[in-house]
Amino acid sequence: MKISEVHLLTDSLSETEFFYKEKLGLKVVVKTDELLFFKVGISQLCFHLSDKIQKPVYHVAFDIPENRLLEALEWIRERVELIPFETNEIIDFFNWNAKSFYFYDTNGNILECIARYDLKNVSEENFNGNSFIKISEIGFVVADVFEFCDEVNQQYQTDYFIRQPKRENFSVLGDDYGLFIVSGENRNWFPTMHRAQPFWAKVFFESKDKRHEILFNP
């Protein structure tokens, strides 16, 4: 599964542009009074201005080269505050054969840089704003996790992620190339104390060589 576009809400396009352009070094590819598109490797991260919802919070993960994790950590640390987990900044998802670290953007979104060692995406370049490979995860918050997952799987021919056990309040759809992180409403976004809440989102993705769109409008 490959995620090509993720559309989210923000209550401040100016703060969002400053963070992703000036802090992370992402290129702005579309800019209007109500919309911002950023290039994230081979994918796009899009923010829509919303006056109705204050501070919507999402989880988004970016793939980074597997051999640049420590360098990426230091590069991000120089620009933003990291989110630690207990005493660790790097978290080992051994079941996924991946390691990652987390940080906030100016909207309060919980961002993750993740190195997936089965993808063999070594880079010889020093880490910079062009090193983000793609968006590889987007979070959805729902009342019934299994019902949502089964509906998505049936409609889009996706499946549960084989590396992650299914749970009533947390399940994952997709594969190493792209994942939908599905959370119940009664838990916090890992690794924070921020309660997961549902917000509007739109996602374009490919599954089994077909292009799909999910409009999530809770």
Image: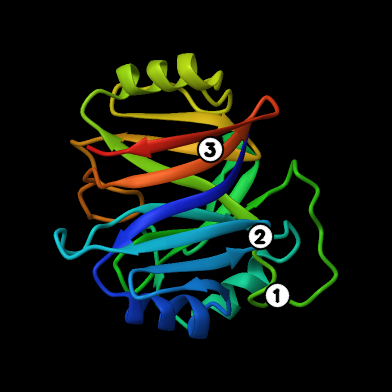
Q: Nearer the viewer, residue 59 or 43?
A: 43
Q: Is residue 90 left or right of residue 200?
A: right
Residue under pointer 2: 64
From the image, state whether disc 3 or disc 2 is nearer to you.
3
Name which residue type carries label 3: Leu
Q: Nearer the viewer, residue 161 or 201?
A: 201
From the image, state whether disc 3 or disc 1 is nearer to you.
3
Residue drawn 34% across the image and 75% down it:
33
Placement of 83 over or under 149, stated as above or below: below
Name which residue type carries label 1: Phe
**CB contact under 8 Å: marks 2 and 1:** yes
Placement of 138 over or under 9, stated as above or below: above
Q: Position of residue 171 (x, y in %)?
A: 40, 28
Q: Tell me the distance, in whole angstroms, between the alpha carbons under discs 3 and 2.
A: 15 Å
Residue drawn 37% across the image and 38% down it:
215
Q: Is residue 69 visible?
A: yes
The scheme the figure's colours follow is rainbow
Q: Earlier in the sequence, mark 2 or mark 1?
A: 2
